Image: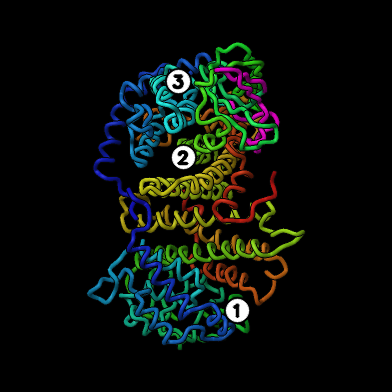
Amino acid sequence: MNLRYSQAEDEFRAGLRAWLAEAVPSLPPKPPLGDWPARRIYDTGWQHKLHEAGYAGIDWATSVGGRGATPVEQLIYLEELERSHAPYVGVNFVGLLHAGPTISVEGTPEQQERFLPPILRGDEVWCQGFSEPNAGSDLASLRTRAVRDGDEYVVNGQKIWTSHAEVADFCELLVRTGPEDSGHRGITWLILPMDTPGIEIRPLRTISGTTEFAELFLDDVRVPVANRVGDQDDGWRVTMVTLSFERGTAFVSELFQSMELLHDLRDASERSGHWADPQIRRRIGHLGAELDALWALVRRNVSEAGQGTVPGVGASIFKLGLSELRQRIGELGMDLLGPYGLVWDDIDGPWSSGSPSSPDSPGSPVLRSGELVSTWVHGFSRTIAAGTSQIQRNIIAERILGMPKEPRR
Amino acid sequence: MNFVLSDDQLALAGGIRALCSGRFALERLRSREGASRVVDAADWEELGRAGVFGIRASEEHGGLGLGMAESVVVFEELGRSLIPGPLVASALAAGLVDGALDGTVMVGSVTRPESGMPTLVANLDSLGILVVVDDEGLALVDPSSLNAKPAERSLDPLTPMWVVNGDLPAGKRIGGPEGAVGWRYGEALLTSAQCVGLAAVSLEMAVEYSRSREQFGRPVGSFQAIKHMCADMLLRVELARVAVHAAAVIADDPEVGDPIRAMAGATLLAVEAALENGRKNIQVHGGMGFTWDVPAHLYLMRARVLEHACVSGESLAETVAKNL
């Protein structure tokens, strides 16, 4: 049991850090959150740079164009990107962490050749068509129908929570091909080109006021059978493969962001005088202890993955712990802001002045009050998206602790 | 980087678990509930022979020559099995007090309270030496020199307590203030490891009971109200365990982290996990959890004892906050 990086791991880190030190400062300014076309250009531009430098698809196998990095190298990669304040994976999320890995395991050679290289290069953007208005936590009850008609499926139905649908080229789409009551046995995984006639996209306004999600309405949308990943009615198994990638290291960046935010809040509390309150100090310390423990848990999970132990078990624990913690950091930020948290505008105060907390991480920004408000509000999505905390607890209780299953259909 | 237990560390844990479930089986321990001596001299020497007190002592001095990482692995097992007695003090005293390492002398410890406050000492009748810890350092005190009265009833029936009249004697000073710093640091880590063991057993008991106990025609463990409680218990165990492991690895190799921050954070989470899982285990057992026969309460009461064995002075959370 050790926490020392090997010489090869240190060299990988040094090379990446040197490249990031050049690449990140040369980026254009970040576009506003609500401007999806601009965000697509920004995020795919960054992906293109990563690809040129050999850092695209770090966790993908070399056989499909990835770097085939070890789990520890993947962790170093995420750590260094966060440290350099490099852009988040953004609109490339579904392609790089969902659809791409799924196609690389379950897709045909033709599908791999057609779809994987453009994801790695940042040429094509994917979105997710899994959830439906009546199929959220109970995803297997989805009702969007696909009926076979020659070499095509004719799809009718509705999807929801589809991030950046309006700028996506493809959608990973789950449809019902079996009878209405076939549950997880009658689902198929399709690749839907977003320029197909019959797709209507309606943006959803979230509690933060932005349009981060959209609803998809599918009306006689024709999808080639060649776009099916896995067998007909075998899509649930393929979906479990997809979600296992999501639950791998997908949330690790958020852990680093949370630690940086907590540092900044600690410094802000010293400037604002809140630090004199032992209750505030203890809240900060407790959050810090939990973040340190989650970081240790990540390193435990990654070490186990390196030994070939199946991940997933620790991932649910990590996701539950981090998302709940993230909300409490958001609450701390709001408490430090006091009445200044009643507006989304940036207001100057103790939180926005002073020197950045981590001098060794260049460009560490000081806190903006509007961003603290945003962090708090966005926190509510963390315990809902990608499996609610309640679903995570069910998974932990049933699959890890072996507790009896609830009666289900 | 390879942050998983090595084969040797797993084997060490397995050996200690076998010793605990054999000689120190719960039924045998429970037969001593309320006694003034819960472990006898032969038991203590057996623990000494198993190496429990000499994990970090060099092999030439009769120890195992291992590190803090191995120590927390062993102490988690001792916590799991509710092994009573001053395990942590005796392990920390190896090298300071003759006979501590091989278990021929049982060494206890106590933090000198602020003037005017009463002192509680655990296991006084069994002790050969009492280490008194204060900001000046460590002092060795002859336990028989204390004017102390046994408590009529101790909260943990396997940790008999004595109430000392008046101030503790000055004793014989060994070393300076740095001795106390090192002692408290080691005490926190080894005690935290025991807490992880307590928290883990509390969870295992709760899960096992919830599988077999039926109400409304099905196991109570199929209800989300129970499941979610158990899932949160596992989250606490896992976070506490990796935090303690990380803190121990950092203790052995201070270049890979901040030893003080890691120790404080791990102790905070481990003590909380032992206390909260202890409470929840009683709740999951329903009425049975409130009976003396079901041992759920023993893990909670031991957690209370351990909480006070390692949390003193400034709050652990504040230590983490200051070292972020």
In the picture, the disc for residue A55 is none
Front residue of B247 and A16: A16
- Element type where label 3 sits in the image: helix
How many numbered discs? 3
Res. B143 image quadrant? bottom left
The tag on residue A43 is 3
Secondary element type, mark 2: loop
Q: Is residue B163 above or below residue A287?
A: below
Q: Which of marks 3 and 2 is nearer the N terminus?
A: 3
Measure the alpha-carbon separation of dots 3 and 2. Answer: 22 Å
Image coordinates for residue A76, horizontal then vertical, percent: 35, 38
- What residue is shown at x 63% (from left), y 35% (from top)? A139
Q: Name the residue under label 2.
A: A248
Quadrant location, the N terminus of chain A: bottom left
Badge nearest the viewer, 3 or 2: 2
Disc 1 or disc 3, which is closer to the eye? 3
Q: Where does label 1 land, which residue?
A: B154
Return the chain for callout 3: A
The stretch of residues the image draws in magenta is A129-157
Residue type beneath disc 3: Asp
Q: Which of B120 and A2 is in front in this view?
A: A2
